[in-house]
Image (spheres, grey):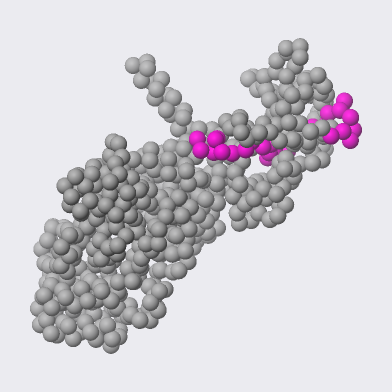
Amino acid sequence: MKGDEPKATGRVPGPDFIRAIVEKDLESGTYGGRVHTRFPPEPNGYLHIGHAKAICIDFGIARDYRGLCNLRFDDTNPVTEETEYVDSIKEDVRWLGFDWEGREYYASDYFGKLYEFAVRLVKAGKAYVCDLSEDDIRRTRGTVTRAGELSPYRDRPVEANLDLLARMRAGEFPDGSRTLRAKIGMASSNMKMRDPLIYRIKKASHHRTGDDWCIYPMYDFAHCLSDAIERITHSICTLEFENNRELYDWFVDEVGFEQPPQQIEFARLNLTHTIMSKRKLMGLVEQGHVTGWNDPRMPSLSGLRRRGYTPEAIRAFCDAIGVAKANSTVDVALLEYHLRQDLNKRSPRVFGVLRPLKVVITNYPEGGVEEIECVNNPEDSSAGTRKVPFTRELYIEREDFREDPPKKFFRLAPGREVRLRYAYYITCQDVVKNEKGEVVELRCTYDPETKGGDSPDGRKVKATLHWVSAAHGLEVEVRLYDHLFNVPYPEDVEEGQDFTVHLNPNSLEVLSGCRVEPGLAEAAPGSLFQFERQGYFCVDAVDSKPGKPVFNRTVTLRDTWAKIEKAQRGKATSE
């Protein structure tokens, strides 16, 4: 791994504290001018938005300083790890816009070396085989205020330990009957240093090595030594591994690496209305609260991708929140703000009516069809225009009509005139109801002199409505998504309660019979659109069929974060 490690010569302005450390190391020549990071997921689940922050940091630092970043799977637990997760992780990293350029490694690549390192520690009197069960090891570890108890097997002779370790490797002993432990001490204030486990017996087939091994290294042992083998310079991880740093350094030093990687911890990403625990997310899937890891309500990258989130928006969000040393929770509205900023620039505008109400224009020719020219994206002049059919019978949003309108309701009502987007002024003349007294149809007239949406005599209207031709519109299913949890901090529960008590019962609303303009019939899965006045929508990549797209609402047009910022600016100005 030495031939592909160029010296870092890049610089970025205004570095965060991690980049400040990297720059200091570059200036001092600590690693010979190299910067080499890694993204090291365990392949036991799908990546989520929190991992996106780590990916952006690991790959971003390598990019900014012209270094390298490995993708390494810390696959030390054969019971929980699967090739499915490996494939999904690689897809997610690529989707976010990063490339490990062939440097794809696995802790399992090093199982032979790791075993040799374990033997080296035993020979040096730094490790021993322990016959205590893992439950007994936990029980005798002590507490933060009380030292742990020495194992009765701690002083076994080196030769006896080597013999037992070899027999563990050969599969002579049942699961859980023996472990290999580091011989450090049981009185350390750092619980991680109290004779931690190095190997355990686990007779399970591994997704890459099959049945070659029946003992597997512990994560804390394999992770740091994999870093050292790969000549990683800066081992970047989240704050929960801060207590592991002492053990990380101990293993690397005792095995004999001369230039150990430097572990640096940063605050993990926490979002309001969101759960980040992989275990709890797995529970949501297994208990049927969501349809799977790629459910658009999940914070998994596969779920966000299916919902219509863009990698550009996620990267911009990660850049905006920066890198901190203290844990905090970010308002999910900030993520949605960056999503809207990106979608506003890239999304074609289309007409989509979610809850249709029929409008019949009584003075428009029967059978007449007009092609109305509509702007594709006012934010992008190069996006051009499209033609949308206009006919005697149309659909508008049901909420755009009130028979008895309240004050400040400026949309359609009996006797009121409004503008149809890019088309004509219409006036409601009559209301048709069914036997239940429900409004089912509006009879309107149009002014043919207002084509294009403006009146030649200068009269103004206070509302512009979107519409779809009844004869040409495509009937589709639309799924409206909201936050999965209805409180900002779903893990804050009363004693005896589970976090699922905060699940939002209205996180998904499925609308059938919606109408969209006919040009969307062949929209490709994953395509993004702004339904004018409704929000941003994505063609579902799983359930859509040729000619029958299903639309997921990615995010509404309402921008909570922008309102927060505006209010803060106003407050600052007044002060």
**Quarter holding the N terminus?**
bottom left
Q: Is residue 244 above or below residue 534?
A: below
Query: Given the current orientation, which residue lies at the most extreme top position?
Result: 457
Q: Is residue 337 above or below residue 108?
A: above
385 with respect to 162 (left or right): right
Q: Along the horizontal axis of the image, is 306 left or right of 101?
A: right
User: Percent x, y for residue 184?
Assistant: 12, 67
Q: Is residue 365 magenta?
A: yes
Q: Is-magenta flag for residue 473? A: no
Query: Residue 459, image x and y in percent?
Result: 73, 13
Q: Nearer the viewer, residue 246 or 290?
A: 246
- At x 61% / y 41%, what residue is drawn? 529
Q: Position of residue 417 (x, y in %)?
A: 75, 20
Residue 408, picture quadrant:
top right
Q: Position of residue 113 (x, y in %)?
A: 25, 74
Please tell me whether residue 537 is drawn above or below residue 246 in the rendered image: above
Classify the position of the C terminus by image quarter.
Answer: top left
Q: Residue at x 39, y 57 (%)?
A: 100
Say whether residue 267 is visible: no
Quarter where residue 160 is shown = bottom left
Residue 421 horizontal side relative to residue 183, left or right: right
On screen, 416 above or below 253?
above
Residue at (35%, 42%) from the top-left corner? 329
User: Magenta part of the protein: which range?
Assistant: 341-369
**Residue 208 in view (yes/no):** yes
Residue at the image point whose x is 29% and y is 54% from the top: 6
Query: Quadrant of residue 262 in the image?
Result: bottom left
